[in-house]
């Protein structure tokens, strides 16, 4: 599987999602996490963490789609963590993968700011037909905001995963740690891979 975690808005949980999904994928085969963000958050995470079950490489360039095939040789799975706002790098990442995962917190502002990301992916579509999935992140269980956001996204006819990633201290304080338990991201990956998700 080759997937990019994409949202042009910052603060949506892209790097956390990329790291946890790479850890979940590493259980299914040799996995490469590509840090395409010039800020290098995923690379910094890996520098501080011990014993990550996947390889991390930095490639924050607009030619990522041309360089990735060589870099990814020998890996069963690739996860690309993309930057907010850098259209060139994000477009290149979208050209390099088969699946774009869009993490989005359940707030009206985040839903409202989704359009530029969707427009960029639509622009890439003729060159690289992508599967797209939206993942609700930072969800407070049982709140009206989570229900309303899911409803709005469904009304926009967007493919929203059933699995949600809760707003949890364990995720927000895990920077620099090797995720031993991937939590809800196992369910996320199961949905993305078409596996039977046990609830």
Image: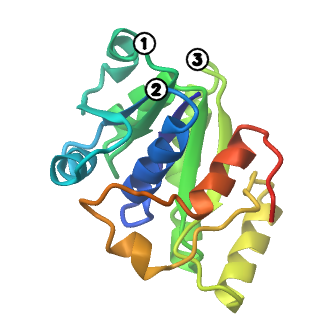
182 and 188: which is toward the camera: 182
Q: Which sits earlier in the primary sequence, circle 1 or circle 2?
A: 2
Rendered location of residue 114, percent (x, y): 55, 59
Q: Which quarter shows the C terminus?
A: bottom right
Residue tagged 2? 30
Rendered location of residue 170, percent (x, y): 42, 75
Residue at (31%, 43%) from the top-left corner?
86
Residue at (66%, 85%) from the top-left corner?
141
Rendered location of residue 21, percent (x, y): 51, 47
Q: Which sits earlier in the primary sequence, circle 1 or circle 3?
A: 1
Residue tagged 1? 74
- Around disc 1, counting alpha carbons within 10 Å, would you say few (fewer than 14), some (14 to 19), or many (20 or more)? few
Q: Which sits earlier in the primary sequence, circle 3 or circle 2?
A: 2
124 and 198: which is toward the camera: 198
Vertical placement of residue 126 versus 12, above or below: above
- Around disc 2, counting alpha carbons within 10 Å, would you say few (fewer than 14), some (14 to 19), or many (20 or more)? some
**Residue 165 seen in this snapshot:** yes
- Give left or right: position of 175 versus 15: left
Spatial distance from mark 1 to mark 2, Cα to Cα? 8 Å
Q: Are marks 1 and 2 in contact (CB under 8 Å)?
A: yes
- Give left or right: position of 92 versus 111: left
Residue at (55%, 64%) from the top-left corner?
104
Front position among marks 1 and 3: 1
Rendered location of residue 158, percent (x, y): 75, 53
Residue tagged 3? 127
Q: Which quarter shows the N terminus?
A: top right
143 and 32: which is toward the camera: 32
Q: Are marks 3 and 2 in contact (CB under 8 Å)?
A: no
């Amino acid at each position: 599987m080759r997937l990019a975690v994409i949202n042009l808005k910052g603060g949506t949980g892209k790097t956390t999602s990329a790291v946890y999904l790479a850890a979940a994928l590493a259980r299914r085969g040799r996995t490469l996490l590509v840090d395409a963000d010039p800020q290098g958050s995923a690379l910094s995470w890996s520098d501080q963490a011990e014993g990550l079950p996947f390889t991390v490489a930095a490639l924050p360039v607009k030619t990522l789609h041309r360089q990735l095939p060589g870099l990814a040789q020998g890996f069963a799975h690739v996860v690309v963590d993309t930057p907010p706002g850098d259209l060139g790098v994000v477009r290149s990442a979208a050209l390099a993968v088969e699946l774009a995962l869009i993490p989005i917190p359940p707030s009206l502002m985040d839903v409202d700011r989704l359009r530029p990301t969707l427009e960029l992916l639509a622009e890439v579509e003729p060159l690289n037909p992508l599967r797209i999935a939206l993942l609700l992140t930072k969800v407070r269980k049982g709140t009206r905001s989570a229900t309303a956001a899911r409803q709005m996204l469904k009304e926009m006819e967007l493919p929203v995963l059933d699995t949600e990633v809760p707003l949890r201290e364990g995720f927000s304080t895990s920077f620099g740690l090797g995720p031993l338990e991937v939590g809800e991201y196992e369910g996320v990956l199961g949905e993305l891979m078409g596996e039977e998700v046990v609830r």
